[in-house]
Image (spheres, rainbow, N blue to C red):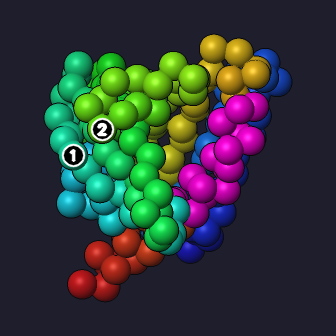
Amino acid sequence: MIDAQQTAITQDPSGKKLIVTREFNASLQQVWDAWTKTDLLDKWWAPKPWKAETKQLNFIDGGSWLYAMRGPKGECSWCKVDFKSIEEPNRFTATAYFCDEAGNVDSSFPPMHWDNNFSANGESMSLLTEITFENEAALNKIVGMGFKEGFTMGLNNLDDLLAGMQNA
């Protein structure tokens, strides 16, 4: 059995890319659905005690996802994800931005270009995500905001959600 609790986040030597790997004890379809369906995304995406709340999701080439991450003290951070290409159920690419509630991009934060790859490994599956930035300073800004810790927590939430689906 694979240890599904291990998230590895490494920085590419170019200084412009984060590489995330994770194994899940779940089917490829279950993990794909958890990344692409509102009712599941909102259950795991934000690091606890924060909550993700989708305003709109249109998971198609050229579509977008607009959501808020709400903190326990009333904090709110809006994000927008523009989907570039989708190859169900193995891969999708997207660009993520911080924004306001209407989806207007906040240019004081760098865009993050995501390439998410999902592959089956028998009864488990592997996730490989590469997040590319315009430059090393942009990457360092996002890492400095706690991205590695927050995303690891979110993937742990996903692992818990998937375990609950297996036991249901």
The kind of secondary structure the magenta stretch mainly shows is helix
Report the residue that reaches farthest toward the front. Answer: 74
Q: Amino acid at mark 2?
A: Glu
Q: Can you see residue 88?
A: no
159 w.r.t. 58: above or below: below
Real-space CA distance between mark 2 and mark 1, rounded to the nearest whole angstrom: 9 Å
What residue appears at the point 44 percent right and 75 percent down from the top-left corner?
Answer: 160
User: Comparing marks 2 and 1, which lies closer to the viewer?
Assistant: 2
Residue 59 image point, x, y percent? 21, 35
135 w.r.t. 103: above or below: above
Residue 113 image point, x, y percent? 50, 24
Based on the displayed image, in which of its 4 quarters is residue 42 positioned? bottom left
Q: Nearer the viewer, residue 108 or 112?
A: 108
Q: Nearer the viewer, residue 104 or 147?
A: 104
Task: Give, as a single range, the part of the protein colored magenta.
Answer: 140-155
Q: Secondary structure at mark 2?
A: loop
Query: Dot 2 corresponds to which residue?
Result: 101
Crowding at dot 2, Cα within 10 Å, few <14 / some 14-19 / many 20+, comes out as some
Query: Dot 1 corresponds to which residue?
Result: 55
Whether the magenta-drawn stretch holds residue 82 is answered as no
Q: Nearer the viewer, residue 142 or 88?
A: 142
Q: Is residue 101 left or right of residue 71?
A: left
25 w.r.t. 168: above or below: above
Q: Earlier in the sequence, mark 2 or mark 1?
A: 1
Q: Nearer the viewer, residue 116 or 97?
A: 97
Residue 2 image point, x, y percent? 58, 68
Q: Which quadrant, please, contains the N terminus?
A: bottom right
Q: Amino acid at mark 1?
A: Lys
Q: Are marks 2 and 1 in contact (CB under 8 Å)?
A: yes
Q: Can you see residue 66?
A: yes
Q: Secondary structure at mark 1?
A: strand
